[in-house]
Amino acid sequence: MKSEKRISPEVKEIPVAWFNGASDSGCTISILNAVNPTIKNVLIDLIRPGYHLNLRFQSTIMAGSGELAVDMLREEKLENYILVVEGAIPTADGGIYGTVGEKEGKPITIQERVLDLADRAIAVIALGTCASFGGIFAAAPNPTGCQGIGDTLKKAKILRPVINIPGCPPHPDWFIKTVVEIIHQGLDKVLKSLDELGRPKSFYGQLIHDICPRRPYFDLGKFAEKIGEEGCLYYLGCKGPLTYADCPIRGWNNQSNWCVMSGGPCEGCAMPEFPDLSSPLYQKIVQKRLPGIRKDTDTEELKVYLKASSNSLP
Ligand code: SF4
Ligand code: SF4
């Protein structure tokens, strides 16, 4: 792949720059909790014989700070890299609501930084719902004009492939296995495996509702009335019928649990409309066609779901 650069006759280096926009660094924390492989494996070991990732910039874990750290983003120091963007991009009023560093005494906006970085990168991974679609930072009324990196690049007419890994935060596997796949199979193959919203189908190919262990309760009309009760959590606000992600079969925290298994509803954190259309979190979903639902799933599933939502249940 084009990002390869030999650092020794045997080992090829793949540089990565990880840039935070408007974020709380929750995605970073989630990825640092990766179990198999661990983040140490990914950053230090050879992901594939002869291939080594080189994380050049990551503001949460890098040793350098201030000018020394920001300097690493300069063109002379960074080339042929994969750009990871965490967090949304504030774009209102020239992007002034989010800045990183200064140039000649003037703040440099996140928008300016990220456009420059994306323009020089070979591909962009939008890590988390905020970077993918705007997320919590773009929640109505969104005075800062926050949006995902894909929309920001489109507006600036920067044609760079963007892989969206939504989730608030995303599961570490969704990110790490995507990176590993890029290195093993090549960027082109991974790009071909994305859905129409730029998400890897292997992780976001199924509705949570279709693979949820509580699904038999839904089909039987047995609904929990309180958190912790047996039954489907649909009437407690579960957004599983609208959310594409493999949480039920992947599990979180080293496969020990996930939202519905712990007794709480799926909050739809991986869907493009999160959090506006997930809210109120603990109320049943409104009866309307949601923009994030793919055409091919406006099917029996959604009809059953809509029908159920009109029942006079508690
Ligand atoms: S509504 Fe939620 S709890 Fe009920 S079956 Fe669907 S995903 Fe599972
Ligand atoms: S189950 Fe729903 S709320 Fe929980 S992590 Fe998965 S997508 Fe997010």
Image: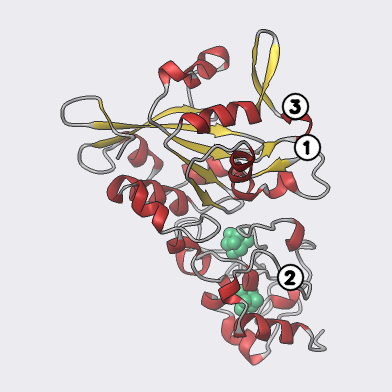
Pick out the residue farthest to the top.
104
Q: Position of residue 123 (x, y in %)?
A: 44, 40
The amino acid beneath tag 3 is Ile
Q: Indicate yes or no: mark 2 CB to ligand 1 under 8 Å.
A: no
Q: Residue at x 41, y 48 (%)?
A: 176
Q: Earlier in the sequence, mark 2 or mark 1?
A: 1
Inspect the image, locate mark 1, and give the three-letter code of the amino acid beneath it: Thr
Q: Residue at x 16, y 27 (%)?
A: 9
Q: Earlier in the sequence, mark 3 or mark 1?
A: 3
Against 276, residue 183 (above or below) is above
Pinpoint residue 247: horizontal percent, then vertical percent.
52, 64
Tell me the CA gap for discs 3 and 2.
Answer: 36 Å
Residue 37 visible, this orientation: no
Q: Which residue is mark 1?
A: 144
Identity of the amino acid at label 2?
Gly
26 lies left or right of 39:
right
- Scheme of image coloration: secondary structure
Mark carried by residue 96: 3
Considering every residue shown, the one lying at the far left of the view is: 9
* Residue 109 place in picture, x, y as percent: 67, 25
User: Spatial distance from mark 2 to mark 1, Cα to Cα?
Assistant: 28 Å
Q: Quadrant of the N terminus?
A: top left
Could you tell me how far apart the alpha carbons at marks 3 and 1 are, in whole angstroms?
8 Å
Which image quadrant for residue 91? Answer: top right
Tell me the element at label 1. Answer: loop
For label 2, the residue is 237
